[in-house]
Image (cartoon, coloured by chain):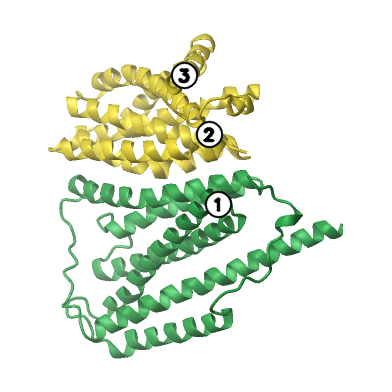
Chain colours: A green, B yellow
Amino acid sequence: MRSRGPATILPLVRPYRISLPALAAASFALVTLALALVFFVVPNDADQGFSQRIFYFHVSIALTAYACFGLGAWKALVHLWRRDPRADLESYVAVHQGLIFGSLVLVTGSIWAKISWGHWWLWSENQLVLFLVLFLFYAAYFMLRFSLDPGPQRANMSAVYALFGVVLIPVSFLAIRLAQRFIHPVVFTRHGPSFGGWMLVAYCVAQAAMLVLAYTLYRVELSGKRLDAKLRELREVLV
Amino acid sequence: MNYVSDVRALARKDILLELRARDTLPAMVLFVVAVFVVFHFALPARSSDLAAHGLLWVAIVFTALLGLGRAFVPEREQRTFDALVLAPCDRSAIWLAKALAMLGFLVVAELVALPAFALFFSGIDGATIAGVALADLGICAVGTFVGAMAVATRARDLLLPLLFLPLAIPIVIGGVGASVAGDPGRYLAFLALYDALFGVLCWASFEYVVAE
């Protein structure tokens, strides 16, 4: 097991393929394009009208949140496997981004539920309930992490808990599907319109925009955290 | 010493400690009966038996939580956790033994709780008992695991419910489904799936929780 010492001072800049300014520019362009497509190009939904347009962001944000949680679990596995302290930080930052996007899923889903069905919260909406469970779970991840001193133990526990998360996602999804049978006999079915043409294009652009935006935020937070760690180690050397 | 005898020795230690000190088990039994009395007054007069069955699961989860909060207290107070980790046995044996001891305590508490529930509220069918048995496995496996995590943190007792309850939501769904639904089979199967998945996960990753 590797000990944390001056020998493992993290490199300030790692060789990345895409630079941060380029990523930021790409995410800005993609988000602008997605907004333009969703608000000006896509036709109104025949069933739900204008309000259906939130779908393009709600669903793409939800999938992005899953991607962040998945990345966090993958980095956690890498950490447990190779004992790499960088992977611990990457896992934490990915889970953090996932929690931010997960909160956005709750907010956008809530708005959509209010406009479509007249209620801010619907227990019959599987995805919304699942994200509430995940929100509670990953909020506890932060409680756990901030209640431990930095070091290998915190890294290990955070990693194990993040791995629990990826098992909990499908298990909870299955459980919530099962729960509908005895909690809500009437299920709102989202019998969507034929999904093609500009709608598909707009959805794909919005999805790409959210993924690139999440990756950009992930990289920004990561470089900030690395700079912070580097500064702290320098300060310890100087004092 | 092989794995089974390690687990047996560790679980025997926990049960002996409990038999001598009687810290946890009487508290769990008293708690669950008190919770039933609270539930009686919390439920409106004409509410259905189904609501009471739902509350049975709340009582079980919180009673388990009460016991799990005490699970690693002897190790913490006597500072014997390091000795356990240093002992020449597989680390997962520590988790398995503790989970088995907790399972024993929970089952004893339920041997009082389920007849009390039948007495106070309504009868209990075989599906509910099967659901409770399967849920106990998952509760003790996951609860002991996060209990070991929580005891290592500064927040300790505060953290255990926060870590445990989101993981227990699928157990509650499966358990309530087994109690109230017309076709309990699929819910029991789900509980078994949960036990298997999280049991393997806890068993495989406990080493990382106690190492260092």
Q: How crowded is mark 1: few (under 14 residues within 10 Å), some or many (20 or more)?
A: few
Write down the quadrant of residue B152 in the picture. Answer: top right
Q: Mark 2 points at which residue?
A: B148
* Circles 1 and 3 in contact, beta carbons < 8 Å: no
**Residue closest to the far left:** B182
Q: Which amino acid does label 2 sit on?
A: Ala
**Residue closest to the far top:** B20
Q: Which amino acid does label 3 sit on?
A: Ala
- Depth check, front residue: B145 or B110: B145
| Distance from Cα at disc 2 to Cα at disc 3 | 15 Å
The chain containing the residue under callout 1 comes to A
Q: Is mark 2 on a helix, strand or loop?
A: helix
| Vertical side of B177 occupied by A67: above or below | below
Instruction: Using the image, tell me which numbered label, if any, was put on residue B11.
Output: 3
Direction from residue A200 to residue B93 in the image, left or right: right
| Distance from Cα at disc 1 to Cα at disc 3 | 32 Å
| Vertical side of B83 occupied by A73: above or below | below
Direction from residue A234 to residue A224 in the image, left or right: left
Q: Mark 1 points at which residue?
A: A82
The chain containing the residue under callout 2 comes to B
Q: Give the residue displayed 17% in from the left and 80% down from the top.
A: A46
Q: Give the residue displayed 61% in from the left and 43% down from the top.
A: A153
Q: Which amino acid does label 1 sit on?
A: Arg
